[in-house]
Image (spheres, rainbow, N blue to C red):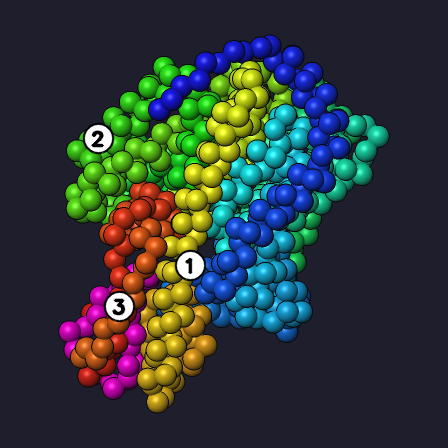
Amino acid sequence: MIGVTQERFPSTAVAATANHDRVQNEGVSRIGATALVALTLLCLLPFSGKAFHIDDPVYLWTAKQIVEHPLNPYGFDINWSNTALPMWEATPNPPLVCYYAALVGRIAGWSERALHLGFLLPALAAVLGAYRLAGRFTRQPWLAAAATLLAPGLLVSATGIMCDTMMVALWIWATVFWVEGLDDPQKPLSLAISGLLISACALTKYFGICLIPLLFVYSIMQKRAVGRWLWFLLIPLVVLGGYEAWTYALYGHGTLWFGLQFTAAKGQARRQGHFSAATGHALVGLAFAGGCTLPALTFGPLLWSRKQLFVGGIAAIMVTLAYFLGWISMGSAYPDPEWLYRHAALVNTQLALCLAGGISVLALAISDLRERGDAPSLLLFLWVAGTFLFAVFVNWQVNARSLLPLIPAAAILTARRLDETQLRLTVWRRLAVIVPLIISGAVSLWAAWGDEELANTARTMAEQVRSKSLHPSTVRFQGHWGFQYYMELIGAQPLDNKTRNFHPGDLLVLPVNNANLFELSSRMTPVKILDFKIGAHLGTMSRGLGAGFYSSDWGVLPFAIGPVADERYYVVRGEEGYPWAEAP
């Protein structure tokens, strides 16, 4: 890797220059914002026909419930884990994004394209919010915003209709208004708006509650005393208290408290000895953080000295080697890494690169705090460190969605470190900044393509069943995610362990790569096997490559390049009895 000679200058000079350039940024913000809007649309519009995927159906069904019963969003049952449960019990997330989906669906319809186009707005808001926030912390806000968009974690997530992209957008804008309101005492309205946006963020995904302590610490550091600003942080507490009382009255159980209990219980189970050692979980977290925030890796030669690059690279290689040799305990939380031995050179290289990226992300936050020691550096450090610790050690599994909030902070930290490197604005300098963005953007689009191909197989399979089956109502299926949505759309029913809704002669459709699957009885006659190729040669949910973008139960990488196995579906017929070998 190529190193760059770096010249440091005092943090006070950086701050003064940043303040001066902040005024200049206001003059070009319209041009920069327009370019970012165009870039976002260029990246996301090609995926507007993507099939509903992973947890998209949960939000979609809730949105349709809201259209019919606006004040009772969870007033229906759902079979999401092989038995029907009340919706409030089946989902650990609040419903604000579902209200937005209901608005989009009511206006534009419920097709994939209509909803994906409607969900371009949260993605645009996230990118433009990163641009505005970065304008206060760095001289290169456009670079920070582009690095936010072109990170695989955000770009792939923005092709779905789940809550995470909207939560990140609200998180960023709440921070923008808080920072601006705190800097200008004449703008109490900005603090009030921030309080409402924090509320909306937490009602989109409960992790948004973390904004309250984050902005409290930032404010103490910035103002060195408690002031009237504290009252505005009480707004989300009041709103969340009202929400909890409302859901308690509806369902006899506050969904906020239930969601927190759900996360804590799952996380505790994951941390028990029979699941995973902390070192193994940390390895997976670093790999996911590095893969999801790819610009922290691609900008590496411009961010770090040769010595720093060497040390970070050796550390990543040593950890990869230790994992390959079985020296790092992974427990039973992760699948047996047969993929690691089948594609040792290919996968080990990707694991080492992702680990190097994860190390770079954490090093950016630590070095920025150590060298500057101001309120913005503390804010960004706590933003990155808090998200990482929650996603890796508190959440019940590592996934890209949980790490999504740290992507804009990592992008801003990347731009801030580039601010400290004084290089002449030569042609090479301009090219050196653009090339890492191009590389990261290309990989992100590749990952989004692979994820779209995976999602589309579920829709295609359901269409095959519909076209070949004379009576779809006699068809049952295992598996959930988008596959469940499309199978129910044609009239098929999910297996239910309580009602035992399976009869001799019924057809059963089984996806191999899905969730909540159970071993079948031997009294099942195979009828047909269908395979769908993933032409992208990149997997986001591929046990064969150790890739688990949405769940680390699939592997230790968020995505992996290589020979992706075909998506296989079985169609079998039951001769007698219930199809499962043992009831779950």
* Amino acid type, callout 1: Glu
Choose between 139 and 578: the one closer to the eye: 139
Distance between the alpha carbons at the discs numbered 3 and 2: 34 Å
Q: Nearer the viewer, mark 3 or mark 2?
A: 3
Q: Residue at x 61, y 51 (%)?
A: 122
Left/right of residue 132 with respect to residue 41 in the rendered view: right
Q: Residue 519 sits in which quadrant?
A: bottom left
> Which mark is first along the chain, 1 or 3?
1
Q: Which region shows up in magenta?
A: 497-524
> Which mark is first along the chain, 1 or 2?
2
Q: From the image, tell me which residue sits under label 1.
A: 452
Does the residue at mark 3 contact the one at mark 2 (Cβ under 8 Å)? no
Q: From the image, tell me which residue sits under label 2.
A: 321
The answer to whether 124 is drawn above or below residue 216 in the figure is: below
Instruction: Residue at the far bottom: name it.
Output: 470
Q: Nearer the viewer, mark 2 or mark 1?
A: 1
* Amino acid type, callout 2: Leu
Q: Is residue 224 visible?
A: yes
Q: From the image, tell me which residue sits under label 3.
A: 531
Q: Is residue 365 visible?
A: no
Q: Residue at x 17, y 33 (%)?
A: 325
Assign a secondary structure to mark 3: strand
Left/right of residue 394 with respect to residue 71 in the rendered view: left
Residue 552: % across, % down: 34, 46
* Magenta run includes residue 538: no
